[in-house]
Image: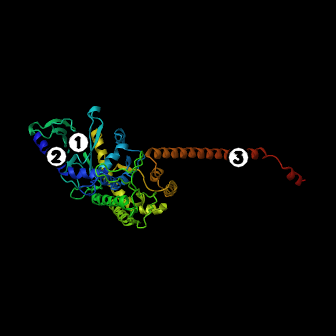
């Protein structure tokens, strides 16, 4: 068995090495560690410092903008008011916080991987969830476009426990293997831990996968435009530093000799014997005067920066368009003093893009929940039932959301569904509100039933009183009737 495992591991290691430089460059650009703009070979320290200041990391918005709107807040069956049983594994793994790391890695590199296996520390009754990025991990599929789970996956940690060998971890449908990737095939497998799940317990997260199985990074298409923006920023800094201020000049000035402070005699250069002159200060606060009528004064015009600013602004708008990020997400855009409706219209394309990301990443999280149920021995969750629920992150005021919620409820939409459209409401808030509404409705029904009961008792008491008075006065002759009979 070790030979096929080692062969698979070396094949996967070759795939990791093939994409390492490209994915590492993408990761650097997402973190702001860009390639430096072009500069002369003999640039001085001042020029090099301006080069460092010219890096403006706009490409990171391609990840950060959608990441702020991607937050899983529930996993439940349609029509159910409570999360599915598997949601407790999400809470135990602290994925409320860690889901952002998975989403960020998937959006940045184009892929991230989550591995779910039985936890040997807890009697193999609970799942152990771990996540890895695409720089050090790869999964191999029979059909990378359609298969839910891969044939096998390999992770090679960046920080190795031993400098003398390269350790990797491979998962397939049988076990998790610890391998020495540099050893001979007969001794490469260091350990094998069967997981008993019957499939490779690895789930791929990607913003989009085409029919050839290629995943899409949100940062990689922006690298060329980001380099152009950095070069334009450097040109702007150079212009502002050396050409944006007026340069004053003077000719025909009679320089003043430097005098000895003790004797008052002119100082002379010890090597040449020539007098030493004071260099005139030409800063903006200095007033230049000369007794010589032949002296001339003037200043060089400043270099305009308007064209550089316009070119730079165009590049920024190009990056925002490629990233599907609304222009008002970047400070300094031309969209100012906009109403909520105008902002919503500006975010239309971004919302559609978010919906696509939620569809793709949501399917991956549902696969993770199915693996959790399988690892815990609860069987596989039905694929067509439980679904991931995303938190509402729309740009709307609370008053608008409340008005929409009331209108939805008037159309018969349940309160638990309508509250999910209110920004900022967590699932705990929704459950508490639904519970309070149900309790208020129950008390109202009890009060109504009690009032109806009291009304019936009062009505019944009035009828009995009338009957009692009628039977008591049945044998009497009214006085007016008796007087009439005389």
Question: Is residue 120 among what the camera can see?
Answer: yes
User: Can residue 324 be seen at all in this image of the molecule?
Assistant: no
Numbered marks: total: 3
Alpha carbons under labels 3 and 1: distance apart: 89 Å
Which of the numbered marks, if any, corresponds to residue 462?
Answer: 3
Picture coordinates of residue 17 (x, y %)?
17, 48
Q: Quadrant of the N terminus?
A: top left
- The crowding category of the residue bearing disc 2, from other C-alpha atoms within 10 Å (few below 14, some 14 to 19, many at least 20), is many
467 horizontally vs 445: left or right? right
Judging from the image, what secondary structure is the residue with disc 2 in?
A: helix
Residue mark closest to the camera, 3 vs 1: 1
Cβ–Cβ under 8 Å for marks 2 and 1: no
In the image, residue 217 lies at what x, y percent? Answer: 28, 55
Q: CA distance from mark 2 to mark 1?
A: 13 Å
Query: In the rendering, which numbered label is found on residue 158?
Result: 1
Left or right of 438? Residue 80 is: left
* Residue picked out by circle 2: 13
Q: Residue 463 in the image: x percent, y percent?
A: 70, 47
Depth check: 424 or 375 in front? 424
Other-residue count near label 3 (Cα within 10 Å), few / some / many at <14 / 14–19 / ≥20: few
């Amino acid at each position: 068995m070790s030979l096929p495992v080692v062969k698979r591991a070396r094949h996967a290691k070759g795939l990791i090495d093939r994409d390492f430089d490209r994915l590492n460059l993408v990761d650097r650009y997402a973190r702001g560690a860009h390639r430096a703009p072009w500069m002369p070979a003999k640039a001085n320290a001042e020029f090099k410092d301006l080069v460092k200041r010219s890096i403006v990391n706009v490409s990171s918005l391609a990840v950060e903008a959608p990441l702020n709107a991607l937050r899983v807040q529930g996993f439940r069956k349609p029509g159910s008011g409570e999360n599915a049983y598997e949601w407790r594994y999400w809470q135990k793994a602290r994925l409320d916080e860690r889901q952002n790391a998975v989403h960020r890695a998937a959006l940045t590199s184009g892929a991230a991987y989550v591995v779910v296996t039985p936890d040997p520390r807890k009697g193999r009754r609970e799942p152990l969830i771990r996540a890895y990025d695409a720089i050090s991990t790869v999964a191999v599929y029979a059909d990378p476009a359609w298969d839910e789970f891969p044939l096998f996956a390999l992770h090679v940690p960046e920080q190795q426990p031993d400098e003398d060998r390269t350790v990797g971890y491979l998962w397939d449908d049988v076990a998790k293997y610890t391998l020495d990737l540099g050893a001979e095939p007969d001794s490469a497998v260091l350990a094998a831990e069967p997981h008993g799940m019957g499939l490779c317990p690895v789930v791929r997260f990607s913003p989009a996968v085409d029919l050839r199985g290629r995943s899409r990074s949100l940062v990689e298409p922006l690298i060329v435009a980001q380099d152009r923006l950095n070069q334009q920023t450097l040109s702007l800094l150079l212009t502002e530093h050396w050409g944006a201020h007026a340069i004053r000049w003077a000719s025909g000035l009679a320089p003043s000799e430097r005098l000895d402070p003790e004797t008052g005699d002119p100082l002379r250069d010890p090597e040449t014997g020539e007098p030493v002159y004071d260099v005139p200060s030409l800063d903006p606060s200095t007033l230049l005067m000369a007794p010589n009528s032949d002296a001339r004064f003037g200043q060089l015009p400043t270099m305009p920066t308007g064209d550089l600013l316009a070119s730079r602004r165009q590049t920024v708008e190009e990056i925002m368009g490629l990233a599907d990020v609304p222009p008002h997400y970047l400070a300094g855009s031309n969209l100012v003093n906009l109403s909520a409706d105008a902002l919503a219209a500006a975010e239309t394309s971004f919302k559609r893009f978010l919906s696509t990301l939620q569809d793709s990443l949501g399917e991956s999280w549902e696969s993770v929940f199915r693996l959790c149920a399988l690892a815990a021995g609860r069987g596989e969750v039905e694929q067509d039932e439980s679904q991931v629920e995303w938190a509402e992150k729309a740009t709307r005021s609370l008053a608008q959301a409340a008005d929409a919620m009331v209108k939805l409820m008037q159309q018969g939409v349940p309160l638990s569904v309508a509250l999910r459209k209110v920004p900022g409401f967590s699932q705990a808030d929704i459950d508490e509100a639904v519970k309070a509404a149900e309790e208020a409705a129950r008390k109202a029904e009890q009060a109504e039933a009690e009032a109806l009961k009291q009304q019936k008792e009062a009505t019944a008491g009035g009828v009995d009183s009338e009957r009692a008075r009628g039977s008591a006065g049945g044998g009497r002759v009214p006085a007016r009737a008796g007087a009439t009979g005389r």
